[in-house]
Image (cartoon, helix red, strand yellow):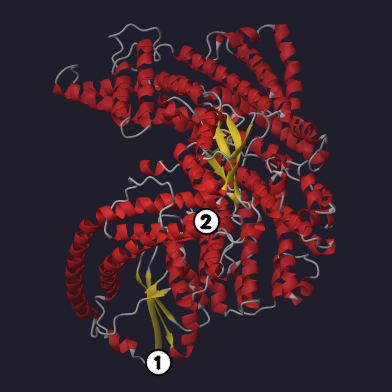
Amino acid sequence: MAGGVADYAAISARVRAKYADLLTPQQILQLSEAPDFQSLFNSLKSTAYEPYLDGLKDKDINPRRVVIQIKKKLADSYYSVIQMSPVQTRPLVKQLYRYFEIGNLKAILRAIVTVSTWNTETGLWDRVRDVLFPLGSNSVLPAQAMVESGSVAAAVDLLHGTPYEEALSFAMKRYSAEQNLFPIEVALDLSYWRRLWSEAQKLTGSDREHSVRIVGSLLDMNNLMWAIRYRVYHKLSEEEVINYTLPFGYRVKDADIRAIAAGADIASVITRIYPGIPDLNALLENPQSGLPKLEVLLKQRIMKECLAAFLGSPFHIGIPLAFLVMSDFEVQDLIVLIEAKSSELPEDEYRPFLLKANLVAEP
Amino acid sequence: MLFPEAMTELELIVPSKDLLAVTKVLGNHGVFHQIDSTYLGLENLGPSTWQEKAASYSALERRIQVIMQNLNLEEKYSGTSNFDSIADLEPLQAAVDRIEAEVKQTSDQLAAEKKTLEQLESQLHQLEPLADTNVDVGALRKSHYLHSVLGIIPADSVNRLQTSLARVPHVFFTLREDPKKPVVWVLGPRSNSDIIDRAVKSAYLNPLTLPEEFDGTPAQIKESISKAIDASKKKISELNTTLAKLADTYKNELNNLLWDVHVSRMIADAIARFGQLRHTYVVVGWVPSAELDALTQRLKQASREILIEATPVEPTGHRSNVPVELRNPGFLGPFELLVNTYARPRYEEIDPTALIAVTFPLLYGAMFGDVGHGLVLAAIGWFLSKRSSLGGLLVACGLSGTLFGFIYGSVFGFEEVLPHLIQPSENILQILSMAIGAGIVLLNVAILLNLYNAFRAKDWGRFFFDSNGLAGWILYLSFLVILGNVASKIFTGESFLPGILLTIGRIGIVVTIAQILFFIGMCLAVIFSHPLQHWMHDGHFVVEGGWGIFAVQSAAEVLEKIISMLSNTLSYVRVGAFAIVHAGFTGAVFIIAKLVSGGEEAGFGYWTAVVLGNLFVIGLEGFIVTIQTMRLHYYEFFSKFFQGGGLPYEPLALASAQKK
């Protein structure tokens, strides 16, 4: 306990200070009431995002730039939590952060594959870097060199010595044969979550208990959504669904995934895992619109797990992890709002996808 | 030195005719940190030819690099060309095509042969687990009723593959155990071949196809493959000789080509990021204010019609978009590295390099105080300083250790040779109290630095209500008085806490005032810190999650703050503790030396043990003390005032290529 107190005294205080900077559900609702993108931007400048938006000149105020600046705050949060977290938990937080690097890696590979269909007015790298998460020097990806390498194989060759080399060495054989990024992306996802889970399992005591709960909840959502999408959208066979998913998690068990893979009624499996999800059958009737909404509901459950981490003893890694997950979800909410306001979408089209605002509305 | 270099934002409007001349000046001067300003250009001018050019040069550079890699030539970025204009692409391409054609033929052959060799070796390796099996592999391959797949699989996928085949009759063998890439063999009825194939494919199994040309038992196949391997190795050796001759022939030409293409690519790349208007270009970037006049002068020489707008940036407020250049004297390089390892200071922040150039060696020397050990460490540092900047750090720490060695009167553990001011092993409580006293001073300095940083950033919430802000400082000072008061009641004689703390703790009125300030400080810097900072920031006094949760969290935070103030203060006790340990370690060395020499304090055995023991102490303690000093700086000191996250200053520099 004494070790825990000493380890977490500084980080806990820092994270709590940062946690207070997160937007409240009421603030998200206020932001959603902005009549247009410019008003939303002005309102955001009176929040904790102000230092990140302040530097933008008038000519730079467009959705793309604003999203990048907003993501920088999340990157800074990760950076400071990694710096301050106790040594034994740092690999876990670093691995959690790699989620964004995996996203960047996928974006780079997709850009290389689709380059031939692009208008070449702007350089490929300039187009790609605007969609990458601003990891800065914390990334092991030689992003520009990969984009400029011109082929997936050459780009992957540049990842020699990175944590992705091993997973990609097997997936590249599939890519060469099928010329499809699907096996690469699945391999990267599986490898990422296996490592993250393994890092959580390495911890002890309350660090392990809380990290398994938060990381496991994230894993549950992804695993479940993969299984459903592979079966419903991709029409994959039972054995393929099993191989493209993971056998562990916090609430979702291997038996649940295998049941979905084997063709069991998805609604009843989900109800068994998460009792109380409303209108599940209606959501699954139209997967195109229903599955994203289901994902929102699952994310809200994760938010509740995160909020729970702030109660009780503060001397564990659960609080920094929960803060980072909540920060990520906040950025997702803001991106929804920015895109909705810049495309002038009516409220009923984007409101269901706001994680925090709907958390208030839930009973 | 105490702050990052002052920066000026530079905006240039360059006539098209002077574009190359201006870019050359920007590149050669090596001080201009370019910002992508393409968005400032007109969109209806069509695609920028410079982007295409940059892409073409980049592709060509990559091709030259590949050729040089194939020829085992080191890439040297140097050349004689003086670029008044960008190098023509066509002749460069023709030259690269010519060399590439010749090299590619041989290198392709070599690559193919290496692949063949790798395949053969892999097949041989695969056969190892089957070596004792007396089965005709060919016959199994031609089986009518069984479907089998042999292959390498990611170790993580093995269990999942078995699970995915659970509903199909099958047999699963792990032929070669490997922590990352085991070899497995899956057999099942041919009627289920589609399921088995889908399962192994989705488990990322890379099938190993035993060569059709080899038949018989594994032992017979192994012998045939070994012969093929020998032939392949011979061919590879011949191809390598051919490539070595080609390398000799084209070495100089390739180096010149690489330089020409590299510089042209850098110029084109830079221009591609300019904003293109109808007859002019807009260039935006940052330049150190000290370099502004020299650069402006050279730009005006390069272009008479250039328009220059310079906007100096004050180091106040949040300046996350301003690049940060730390300009410390060369001898502070190792300490700058230490700072950058933690984080790069922001533009508006104090650069703590000069400060830790004093505190780091000081704390190190206090823990490693021995004239002999310090000089050995300094000598090692001096030797390493030619190869690594960390050598300088060892020199400073070693010299500080030497200085403290004189204070402790210790040379290679001999404590009777020199006079001393204080001896750690004899004055334990005194040493510990001095260490804590130094820690208290450093913590107060850190809080003052945080106040200054918050003041410069005009971050008033942080200045007043941060746990290391003004309220936090009052809280910490009052905590020290209360600590002194409590300790004065416990320790009636000498204690490990500084005497002044205990003296102040015995003055009733001071303690009463401290208790009141402690309560106020706790309210402002801990309990209501976040709502107050919110209030300062946007005028809203926000209590997150309602008063109930707030009360629970506040209770935890108060406890946490008290513990952290105590642990932060006492953390510096390790400085004294390690000074004592150092003396203890060397004392142990002499005891062992005496045991080795049978109780005598002389002889070969005795002196050998003394020398080896001292080397062991220097190595082990040098390492541990480094970690402890870094810990004290990173966790106890920096975390109080240093936020970091500054943007690195990366000037456009054609000359930098030569430095590569």
> Which chain is disc 2 placed on?
B
User: Helix, strand, or loop for circle 1?
Assistant: loop
Give the residue type at disc 1. Tyr
- Give the side of residue B558 with respect to residue B155, left or right: right
Q: Residue A299: give x, y in percent of width and height.
A: 71, 59
Give the residue type at disc 2. Trp
Q: Earlier in the sequence, mark 1 or mark 2?
A: 2
Q: Residue B157: give x, y in percent of width and height.
A: 47, 68
* Tag nearer the camera, 1 or 2: 2
Q: Nearer the viewer, residue B304 or A251?
A: B304
Gap between marks 1 and 2 measured at Cα: 64 Å
Quadrant (top left, top right, bottom left, bottom right) of the C terminus of chain B: top left
User: Helix, strand, or loop for circle 2?
Assistant: helix
Label 1 crowding class (10 Å Cα cut-off): few <14, some 14-19, many 20+? few
Label 2 belongs to which residue?
B50
Q: Residue A51: give x, y in percent of width and height.
A: 69, 39
Q: Nearer the viewer, residue A258 or B486?
A: A258
Q: Are marks 1 and 2 in contact (CB under 8 Å)?
A: no
Question: For residue B129, which numbered disc appears in the image?
Answer: none
**Residue drawn at the location 29% of the way across and 63% of the way down:** B99
Q: Is residue A355 visible?
A: no
Question: For residue B145, which numbered disc appears in the image?
Answer: 1
Q: Nearer the viewer, residue A358 or A246?
A: A358
- Give the side of residue B523 with respect to residue A257, left or right: right
Instruction: State whether discs 1 and 2 lie on one chain.
Output: yes
Q: Is residue B614 above or below residue B643?
A: above
Quarter holding residue B579: top left
